[in-house]
Amino acid sequence: MTAFDELLTWQESSTSGDAIAAALEAADLAPSAALDVLGEAQRIVVTGAGSSYYLAQAVAAAARASLGRAVIAAPLSELILRPGGVLVGDEPVVIISRSGSTSEAVTVAERMSATGHPTVAVTCRAESPLAALADVTLVSPTGDEAAIVMTRSFASMLALLLAVVARLADDDELASDLRRLPERWPEATEAAATGRRLGETNWSRVVILGGGPAIGIANEWGLKLTETSQVPTSAYEPLEFRHGPISVCEPGVLVVGLVGGAGIADEAAVLAETAELGAATWLIARDEDEARGARGTVSLVGGGLHPVARLPLLLHPAHALALRIALARGRDPDAPRHLGQVVILGAE
């Protein structure tokens, strides 16, 4: 079995800080055409598949708050199979795909172009079918990966898109705090060390809680845990966890809270309830004030930053937890079962 530090997936995740920095520079140089396509639209659809869909969820929620407009996230498959349930006019569609070759991403780009929807591709591969089809392409220049599961590609494309949102909204606070992410990368590595330690326990189940844009990050944590280790995993908005799912709490269950900013007191209270019910907890807050009174394990990431700006820092701790659990369960996270790097429908 490969040692943890020798895992390709971990090595690539560990370079996310540099990839985020490069993506932020790319956002500063984003063509005006991208801003023009999105700037006047009263409704925007952001779409992807798998991790890219969860990235879309985070970006759409952040954009709604910053732009005050209707920005929705939908899976690529819905735009193919049930477009009438997603599209209402000729709104622009932002298509996210690490490879730019995923079958659904290419199909959506073709169909959106044919039906008059402006398209913006977000990818790590400039010379890809999606990039060739889209009206405008935004590229994370060093986000591409050799590993099967997405790590630095997610964090860097997230940073890129959040920076574009900040430009569209003239949100100087968000833009400024995003530029501080590279210097705050050590906080992500410290939290990742905690995740690595927690991953040594044979958890029966892991639950991740995140509200607002963080629900997309929570869903991505869940996907990483599922695809690398197959440990039973669920993600919920924190207060929704009370409405039934909290019944899973018992010893042997780990509940992770990705909290910070608006709603912190209420969301942290849910995590405290889970501790009272016997679950182990890991609270990832911004600072000591947000973590005050917390039980269980605490990590501080992004203190003083805009709650949205800190989101790209929250992926590396997830990878540490997921990969360590995978190794503990006898899995090879560099070769997760039944998976390839790119989903090509109809491929042999």
Image (cartoon, grey):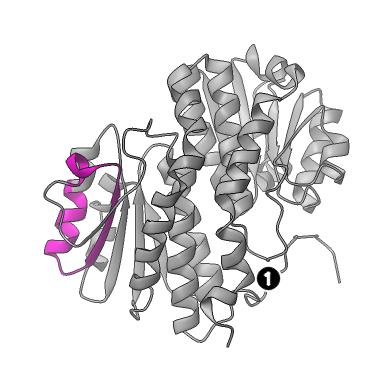
Which residue occupies 56% across, 67% down? 10
Residue 132 as seen in the image, left or right of residue 207: right
- Secondary structure under tag 1 reads loop
* 257 vs 151, nearest the viewer: 151
Please say if 85 is above or below 238: above
Q: Nearer the viewer, residue 304 or 45?
A: 304
Q: Position of residue 179 (x, y in %)?
A: 52, 31
Magenta segment? 269-291
Residue 71 locus on image (x, y percent): 55, 26
Q: Of 109 and 81, which appears nearest the observer? A: 109
Q: Is residue 228 above or below residue 332?
A: above
**Which quarter of the figure is the C terminus placed in?**
bottom right
Give the quarter of the figure containing the N terminus.
bottom right
Q: Is residue 109 left or right of residue 189?
A: right
Q: Is residue 287 magenta?
A: yes
Is 104 positioned to the left or the right of 154 in the image?
A: right
As for residue 270 lying within the magenta part, the answer is: yes
**Is the residue 181 above or below the residue 256 in the image?**
above
Expressed as whole percent of the image width and height from the top left, the position of residue 22 reads: 65, 39
Q: Residues within 10 Å of mark 1 (few under 14, many from 20)?
A: few
On the question of residue 53 being in view, the answer is no
Tell me how many marks there are.
1
- Which residue is found at the position 69% from the left and 32% from the top? 26
Name the residue carrying label 1.
339
Q: Is residue 203 left or right of residue 183?
A: left
Q: Amino acid at mark 1?
A: Leu
Residue ID at (46%, 47%)? 185
Q: Position of residue 269 (x, y in %)?
A: 16, 47
- Which residue extends farthest top? 40
Q: Is residue 29 above or below residue 182?
A: above
Is residue 111 in sight in this rendering? yes
